[in-house]
Amino acid sequence: MELAYSIAASVIDKIGSLAYQEICSAWVVSSDLKKLELTMSTIQAVLLDAEEKQVKNQGLSVWLGQLKDVFHDAMDVLDEFECEALRRQVVKMHGSTREKVLDSVSYSSFNLLGFGYKMSQKIKGIRESLEELAKDRAQFHLEERFEDQRIGDRKREMTHSFVRDCDVIGRDDDKQKIIHLLMHPDDNCNVSVISIVGIGGLGKTTLAQWAYNDKRIAKHFDSRIWVCVSEDFNVLTLPKQILKSTGNGIKKNMSMDEVQVNLRSILKKKRFFIVLDDVWNENRNKWFSLKNLLTEGGQGSKILITTRSHKVASTMAPGPIHDIEGLAENDCLSLFLRWAFNEGEEKQYPNLIKIGKKIAKKCKGVPLAMKTLGGLLYSKTEERDWISIRDNEIRKLEQNNDDILPALRLSYNRLPSYLKQCFAHCSLYPKDFRYSNLDLIQSWMANGLLQKSNKSAQELEDIGEQYIKEFLSRSLFQEFKDIGTFVTFKMHDLIHDLSLYVAQNDYCLIENTNNSNNFEKARHVSILDHNLGVDAMIAFLNKLSNNMRTINFSCKDWPSAEHTFINKPLVETCISRFKQLRLLNLRYPRLEELPSSISTLKHLRYLNLRGNKQIKKLPKSICNLQNLETLILRGCEELEELPRDIRKMISLRYLSITTKQTRFPTNGIECMCSLRKLYFDKCPKLESFTKGIQRLTALRFLGFQNCESLNSLPQGLKHLTALEVMSIQNCEKLNLMEGDDYPTSLRKLSIGRLPKLVALPLWLKGSANTSNFLTIFDCHNLVVLPEWLSDLNSLQKLMIRYCPKLSSLPKGLGHLTTLRELEIVRCPNLRRNCERDVGKDWPKIAHVPLVKLI
């Protein structure tokens, strides 16, 4: 069982948070919580060792599963306190006189003690269960281990510098690029660093070996040195290894000073080439300690590192980074067949080659995956064996320590505990799914996976963005696209297999309800088998654990007949069975009515009703969801109005709306002070926003799309000092008026399909020092860009699309030294004038590193 350590850490962090301590002190349970925290900390200390050893011990795996169940129960009890505190807060702020009287009675000392006593008993029961389980740990002989201690027997095998040319397939272009970088002099320093970055098993080491053994490299450098670093970046051990590789002997007890004197003396004035293979070090101090010993090298000396992490690469030096990609399809098949057959033998089995093509395709270009699956089939010529490999997921196949899944798992093992649950959560989406940072962060948030320290002033959304950047840096996310107002990315199929493997029974992606195993104990599920009717789906739901926290019925962002099974009885089943739900995704349902019992899901933090084109009214009771953070009503085109008591949803951070309302009543949305993102889409009658938007002081994103009656932006935007992103699209009557009542700290602005737009609004200058991303599209009456555009001195990316009347860029654009990317799409006159070297506007943008003209 994975994730036990991470879940325990989440519970302990919650108990220790200042906000939680304040909540619980009112019910006099602080001492009970301290005892629980102590018990959990004692158990947590051995969980890393237990998670490592469970592979060979079934009893240990069962014990970890029992512990996880109790940890989840503990989190549910802790959340009970927050629910009650929020409920009382809402009654105090927005309740009727009758509600306040009733609540004052329930808040009497007797009832207060009654609630505290009930919760104290629950905490005591959890602690007793943990203590009982703690007694069993002695039989497993577990060791205490801190999170930053390395996992010994999962280290990668040591590598060497040799590879035969005939063993390398499909890397000719990569090799030439690396050799060019190695032989290209760097005028800034004697010793420069080049990085090869990519996921595990992609062939980084093989590429480095191939370059290392090239005759041109051997001739170009005075000395070549290969060091396999792996997980131990030791500033004494590494110089010794380098010294030893130079051919000079080392004494057993050499001091650091002796090592550095000898090493500097040997490398002095020599043009050397050092490969540091499989680097994980993110500590700049350690790197500089090593680098300082290598500065005596001659001009043109190079250090080549291989790593899975861009963060590691940037830590080592700001030098060139070569991102290695998967092999082409033909190369994949060649490599796979080489490992599955003896040379020339494959010609005897044309039917196996046909199956092999599909097997190679599922490896998604990763050489180690090809070797793993080819090795499993070596000497096997029965079609059933090959079909079995073709039809089974890689994670379910038996593998040796040096095969693909254990190799990839090193990346998971290196993740800090707070990222491991987030990584497992990604398994709820199908392969080849394009993730959105907004939705993924909201999903993580709903399940309490974003950890905020007591001293941190960071917003949860910023913590989520930080997590995504860490995954990108570690090559666990890829194909990153910045759309402007949000970003998207994917997981490599093999990384997705890894997420499914570590998620095990906690997170279940159910694409075929007939073939699912062990989903009965899952707490998070995506049910993407849409071949079931309503009755069959309800029957399936009744097989799931009552402790469900996530139910996701769709991952698609467009309507589909597949979603017709979502109706009121099905939703009522979810509500009645799964009282611990944190996330309920009903995207594109066919609901005519949302059950009023939705209010009983007091733990619910995320509710998605996107694309429900039949629902006309939401139940008033929905406003009692005080924990709800995300409410998505986008695409609910028949929705007549929002509930009048929506202000009671005091935890709501993200709200997207489609409605037929002309305007919103006062004391509604503008009272929801927790809102961070507010988005209006397809509100055809909406003319203006109610006064009071300045009260939304936490608002960071504001968007209007397809609001054809909207004639002006809300008044009071200049008071929204936290507002960073605005998106305004397809609002044909909207006039972006000049004036001073506009935001002054925007970072990103996207405007498009605005017929009345003939010039950029002057108020954008108010964000000159903060604006870094500007997108303009489908503005057919926009004739010229203002000269003051060059005043946006923080602008990094400018995208101009489908603006046919634009023909030139402002003169001062050449002064925008921060501009890193310019994209011009379907603007024929402007494109012609910006042609490289020959266009009259080219001198204005020649300094921009990336210019796209389409």
Image (spheres, grey):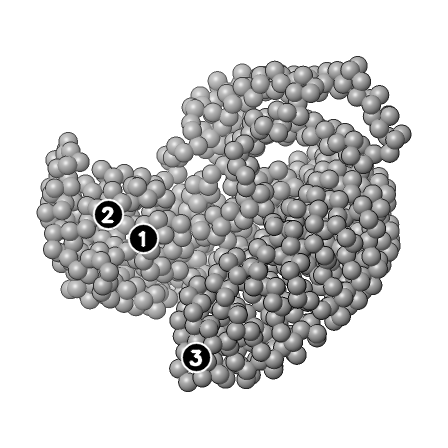
Q: Nearer the viewer, residue 19 or 536?
A: 19
Q: Mark 3 or mark 1: name the one nearer the start of the chain.
A: 1
Label 3 crowd bin: few (<14), some (14–19), many (20+), radius 10 Å: some
User: Vertical placement of 380 versus 254: above or below?
Assistant: below
Q: Is residue 120 visible?
A: yes
Judged from the image, the secondary structure of the residue bearing numbered disc 1 is loop
| Residue at left offset 43%, top offset 69% | 815
Give, as a three-letter code, the residue at label 1.
Ala
Judged from the image, the secondary structure of the residue bearing numbered disc 3 is helix
Q: Position of residue 209 (x, y in %)?
A: 27, 57
> Which of the numbered marks, if any, corresponds to residue 542?
none
Q: Mark 1 or mark 2: name the one nearer the start of the chain.
A: 2
Q: Position of residue 372 (x, y in %)?
A: 43, 52
Give, as a three-letter code, the residue at label 2.
Lys
Q: Disc 2 marks which residue?
A: 291
Give, as a three-letter code, the residue at label 3.
Trp
Residue 327: quadrant of the picture: bottom left
> Which of the numbered marks, if any, corresponds to residue 317?
1
